Amino acid sequence: MSTLWPAGPRRVLVVGIDGVRLDLLPDLRTPHLDAVAAAGFLAPVEVDDVTPTMSGPCWATIVTGVGPAKHGVYGNHLGGNRLDVFPDFTTRLAAAHRRRTFAAGGWEPLFLARDGGPLFAAPGRLAYIAPLEDTPEAWEVCDERVTAEAEYVLGRSDDDPQASFVYLGAVDETAHFRGCGADYRRAVETADARLGRLLAALRARPTHRDEQWTVIVVTDHGHVDAGGHGGRSTLERTAWIAASGPGITPGAPPPGPLHHTDVAAHVYAALEIVPDPHWTLDGRPFPTVAPAEPAEPAAEPVPAS
């Protein structure tokens, strides 16, 4: 029988919203993203020169904490990857640290053994909800169902994932079909409303008052005005991270540049886990947080329910 360490108060939620342009956010109604930023920060991330501005390599970098030279993902087909050596944080935490983890979304390579995937190999709990077709409307339905499932899981104290990743893809799909005009902007605002529902689910947990939540919201890449990415323009290379939680100073931007690899590194730090040097992470915890000291629970592990 597998065992799980007692949870402790620390929890992390990472919400990945695909393809959200940073330069448009000031003109959009995104109160929930704004609240995360006000409680912590929102800062730009530049996709580096060796990473294609595509979802596959960018999300792989975000959730593994290493770049393409290590994880081996260079396109939206994940074939040839080294994710067995450099797993996503939900898989690593479940396997190496016996933590409850959760991942949810609707893009096949992230969650299924198709197109060289999955990126999320073995979280403690996985919810894959497929869009019925590749259209903006179908992706909105998919994201709605993903959000509802994540609300259910995150709101329960019995299942109690300590590290979760929720993927929303409708914004990116809308840009590909319709460019970055009015429909795209409405899709960003709708994604923000879904973020708000996830945050409300955390606050409604029966044990919320005894918990310390870190929330990270991140996008993978931008888009050109007509919709599309994969090139090296500033619009395509500019992504962003917003985060709040223990040790993050409200309203204080990080003193140095952020990188996509920092997300997974910060997940571990927020859970007070010091990465094994053999993981060779490329990222570091967000600069506003001091590195965590080793803090694995001293108590005996308890049987999984």
Image: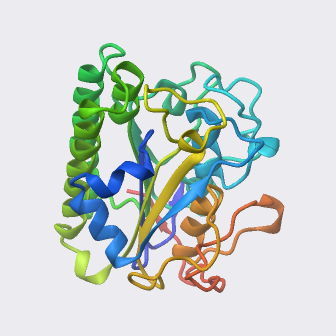
Residue under the image location 65 percent in, 86 percent down: 293
Residue under the image location 53 percent in, 44 percent down: 220
Q: Position of residue 199 (x, y in %)?
A: 25, 62
Residue 156 in sight: no
Asked if 46 appears above or below 253 in the picture, the reply is above
Is 182 left, or right, of 247 in this rendering?
left
Q: Position of residue 202 (x, y in %)?
A: 25, 65
Question: In the rendered view of the protein, which quadrant contains the C terminus?
Answer: bottom left
Residue under the image location 24 percent in, 61 percent down: 32
Q: Position of residue 265 (x, y in %)?
A: 63, 65
Asked if 267 appears above or below 51 in the picture, the reply is below
Looking at the image, which residue sits at the far top? 133
Residue 227 in sight: yes
Rendered image coloring scheme = rainbow
Choose between 13 and 234: the one closer to the eye.
234
Choose between 10 and 27: the one closer to the eye.
27
Asked if 188 appears above or below 155 in the picture, the reply is above
Q: Position of residue 45 (x, y in %)?
A: 58, 57
Residue under the image location 61 percent in, 25 percent down: 76
Is 139 left, or right, of 19 in this rendering?
left
Is 60 left, or right, of 148 in this rendering?
right
Dividing the picture into quadrants, the one containing residue 13 is bottom left
